[in-house]
Image (cartoon, rainbow, N blue to C red):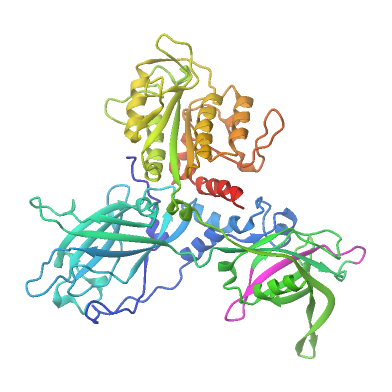
Amino acid sequence: MGPMIQFPNINNFLSCSFIKSNAALGNGQTSGPLPLQSDISLSSCVMRRRLWGNCCSDVAGGQSAVGGTASYHTSSAVNAPNEAVEAFLKSRGYQGLYSQIELSLSASNLRDRDVLSKSDPMAVLYIKGRDGSLQELGRTEVVLNSLNPKWIRKYTLTYQFETVQYLVFRVYDVDTQFHNIDVKVLKLEEQQFLGEATCALSQIVTKSNRSLSLDLGHGEAFSGPAHTRKFGQLTVYAEESVASKTTTELILRCSDLESKDLFSKSDPFLVISKLTETGISVPICKTEVLKNDHSPKWKPIFLNIQQVGSKDSPLTIECFDFNSNGKHDLIGKVQKSLADLEKLHSIGMGENLFIPVSVGQNYQSKVLKSQLFVDTYSEKIQYTFLDYLAGGYELNFMVAIDFTASNGNSRLPDSLHYIDPSGRPNAYQRAILEVGGVLQFYDSDKKFPAWGFGARPIDGPVSHCFNLNGSSNYCEVDGIQGIMTAYTSALFNVSLAGPTLFGHVVTSAAFIASQSVANNERKYFILLIITDGVITDLQETKDALVSASDLPLSIFIIGVGGADFKEMEILDADKGERLESSTGRVASRDIVQFVPFRDAQSGDFSIVQSLLAELPSQFLAYMRARDP
């Protein structure tokens, strides 16, 4: 198991809060006043924005027109990132998939520590830090006289795919004299300990029913003789906090727009805003700018019901004439809900735009001849990353290790492959431990294909894809420790050679992924390539990657050592230019993420965060392309 990876000061930024419940405890009494639900913090607002993003069309002009950026390249804009939010998160060391998870707890067959009645249990949740320290995240209410409690109060915390979030649950029997005291101020050392359980959050969310039962034990923190008596069980249920997964696709157009420019037609774009209960208008969506067009038809836009509030929530659709100075002229607007827009589409009629005009000290609406039409209105359910995991999809880890001579003699301390007798892992081992330590929880059998490349096996030619376990028949090893053992063994059974070629291992990984597709398996594969140098088969690797882009496969490349990896970054299409094969075929999606190990270890970012942050979006891009 890899080391625990945790964001710095995670709970100072992402507070774990309880959801207030007025439900009664055990016999209708409460253990004291329930803590009020805290106000929505900036962090929770940011998290929700990161989850859903802003809605916009996919043309740079429209984004520039209303303060967006040209970085939105996806047509499914409901999943597009919000750069301001991402900058806010990354400035604090956060990146990747964020999802609010609500945990519910229950227990069974608890120990009875009371003489004349049953125990009065309370549960406490902690998160374990990288150094093994525990930070308390919250407490449930006290359930009176129960050995099988079902606690009402929930835990809300943020699931981060690219980290291993270890949770510790402790159950206490609260003494009668403390029943009227707020649980937040109870001194735990004054309560009777009933048991402890530990798990990773990823172990819960990958269950088909998102429910995990754990045996309660004595716990490492509590000294004393070993207990053979059973402490009972704790059941944890996880639910993703998503108000709605319904996404609406709209294609809007206007007719007979008035010209706001003196010597040319208007350059129209739309801004869709929702109205809050206080009457404030909040922009949630924008289209591209269409130049010199009085009858514009914009590209599809996507709205999530959660962004809007509800299907009947009032929306304002404003049509502006774009001006490069940022002072855009209002051409006209309409106020309609999604339900109204659906009706306009069904009857095929337009809605006249209006514009506010001042009459004395008041404003009146002047109806224009310009009209808004809804050419397309459709709704669909868009499943989340966690939905797919709960539905049975697995993430299967594969690794390929560079054994070229440029790594240096593995028996010398200056080699990148040097095995330190003290047990300190080298760069290759650290990368395997950290990446594999996260991904192992998403693979049920934990049998990982492992290859080497660029070496000469005993009495053989140089191989650019050999099984790390030494077998000529199968490539899998058992668990992360199996990879580590096979890697160490291989160092003593091969001669480092070269050159550095990726094409063979990419093709091998792609073959496994294609076989999985042919067998209708619910699997997505991640190939980790660890290398110390620049590849010499760049075009062949491009061809293999373009071919693999249609498969359930992502490829992570870690560059170790001090080589110049500029050419490697060509394989990572983060800048928007997708790979092209020698035959002119363009990759259907970006499946490569590259990071130099030295960069990934600087500052607050770990290699896991740097690499795995892209995986959920790559997974969803693959799934949604198959089921649009």
Q: Residue at x 84, y 73 (%)?
A: 370
Q: Position of residue 456 (x, y in %)?
A: 45, 14
* 310 vs 466: above or below: below
Confirm whether residue 252 shows in the render.
yes
* Quadrant assignment for the N terminus: top left
Residue at image point 64% right, 57% down = 77
Q: Answer with the quarter of the image where residue 587 lies.
A: top right
Whether the magenta-drawn stretch holds residue 272 is answered as: yes
Where is residue 89? Give x, y as percent: 50, 55
Q: Is residue 49 left or right of residue 217?
A: right
Image: 595 above or below 361 = above
Instruction: Measuring from the top left, give residue 385's x and y in whole percent.
Output: 49, 53
> Which of 168 and 61 lies nearest the eye of the viewer?
168
Q: Quadrant of residue 175?
A: bottom left
What x and y, as percent, mark residue 433? 37, 36
Residue lying at the far top of the rendered structure: 459
The question of residue 157 being in magenta is answered with no
Side of 289 where 512 appears, left or right? left
* Stretch in magenta: 262-283
Residue 556 visible somewhere in the drawing: no
